[in-house]
Image: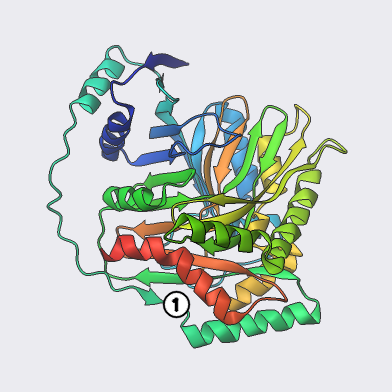
Amino acid sequence: MRTKRLYTPVNSKEFKNQVLHWAQQFDDVVWLDSNNYNQEYSNYEAILAVDAFTSIQTDSIKAFDDLKEYQNTTKDWVFGYLTYDLKNDVEDLSSNNYDGLGFPDLCFFQPKKIFLFSKDDVEIQYLNFVDDELDADLIEIKEYRQSPNKEVHNDIKIKLRIHKDEYFNKVETMLNHIHRGDVYEANFCQEFYAEDTKINPLETYFKLNKISKPPFASYLKFRDKYVLSASPERYLKKQSKIVISQPIKGTAKRAKTIEEDEKLISELLNDEKERSENIMIVDLVRNDLSRTAIKGSVKVEELCKVYTFEQVHQMISTVTSKVEPQTNPVDIIKSTFPMGSMTGAPKISAMQIIEKLEESKRGVYSGAIGYFTPEGDFDFNVVIRSILYNASKKYVSYSVGGAITAKSSPLKEYEECLVKAKAMREVLEN
């Protein structure tokens, strides 16, 4: 049983900062923040889950079966991540590229303590509540005062796993596959990394979030492994009988003036290549959702709408479906995983080509972070615009990618990658 209490902080913004610092004492932490972004499908402004009561971590073999059993057994809130490499559980695929991070393929935990932020209040839920524990924690949180950061960081030297000329050659190879009919869209990614490097994960997350302010930000800590995410993209959400997918395809940089921004938005809206990217993935998502949907319930609610974020403009579509009450939530995720926006179409062929051309195992990048509720609802982001860090290995990584179609220009794709990588590079180098 969970003990619940409603708490109204005097200053919500300050309380968020204090509670996230307080959370660092625990080995297992998931923080999800909408940054007050105005969005239709939203339950909470932010969520913090800490301190594992039970947990599961596994490789890709029968991972979704294990997750289904864990979710069915706990019948409680569970938080965690799914790596891109769970594709190997869904299809007859493998991941053989270099992995400098060493994250488990799947990791979830049932938290003892949850903080659910709404506009003015925080609902606090404690599992196996001990008398005065919640009051003592609130005092500790409110009394938190940030001390000067005395940790010395070594200079971060960011390296490219794929250099520019090699990137061009790989995109040309991808285009050959497209012209041959093997695939008509594929998401090709490249890794930027730094070795023998120490960072302060929480402060790095705060910096990244401040310059990006995305609607699906997340900070994840599992012992010595961290994900600092400024994701603008929802992967999949289930709310009662409704399932929502919001793929992003189509990117334009931000300008310095409103007039220039409006011009870039108009150009993105009318860009035939960018629109075709988005529509191809919408078709793929419709097909994926139909596997668990009530017949005739899959709908495109919004097609190719441009949303503006701190760093970029993005073209987003919204696809929904309805499911029967007895449909297992993990089955819905498995039938759509990995998300179409990070794979391509046809999906299996795209993933096979991606594996051959990319140089790094994606891991948590282009996977998903989120949670299941006790009622079997869920909400997961797409892990993009994110910094991954293994503190024990002193290895820092961020990856970016883009959809390659028949109309793609290798140079323009490379430039788009640099736009997407800008925030992570700025945060790590400054």
Q: How has the structure been colored for display?
A: rainbow
Residue 424 % position (x, y): 38, 61
Residue at the right extreme of this rendering: 295
> Which amino acid, mark 1?
Arg
Task: Work out whether residue 202 can be spotted.
Answer: yes
Q: Vertical placement of 162 versus 189: above or below?
A: below
Residue 130 % position (x, y): 32, 15
Image point 39% across, 45% down: which residue? 219
288 to the left or right of 82 = right
Residue at the front extreme of this rendering: 259
- On the image, numbered disc 1 is attached to which residue? 161
Task: Decide which of 272, 367 is in the foreground and name it.
Answer: 272
Q: Vertical placement of 97 versus 135: above or below?
A: below
147 to the left or right of 200 = left
298 to the left or right of 315 = right
Q: For residue 194, what is the image quadrant?
A: bottom left
What SS does tag 1 mark? loop
Residue 34 % position (x, y): 47, 39
Label 1, residues with CA under 10 Å away: few <14, some 14-19, many ≥20: some
Residue 363 % position (x, y): 51, 60
Task: Work out whether residue 61 can be spotted.
Answer: no
Image point 81% across, 77% down: which residue? 181
Q: For residue 173, what is the image quadrant?
A: bottom right
Task: Decide which of 292, 60 is in the foreground and name it.
Answer: 292
User: Quadrant location of the C terminus?
Assistant: bottom left
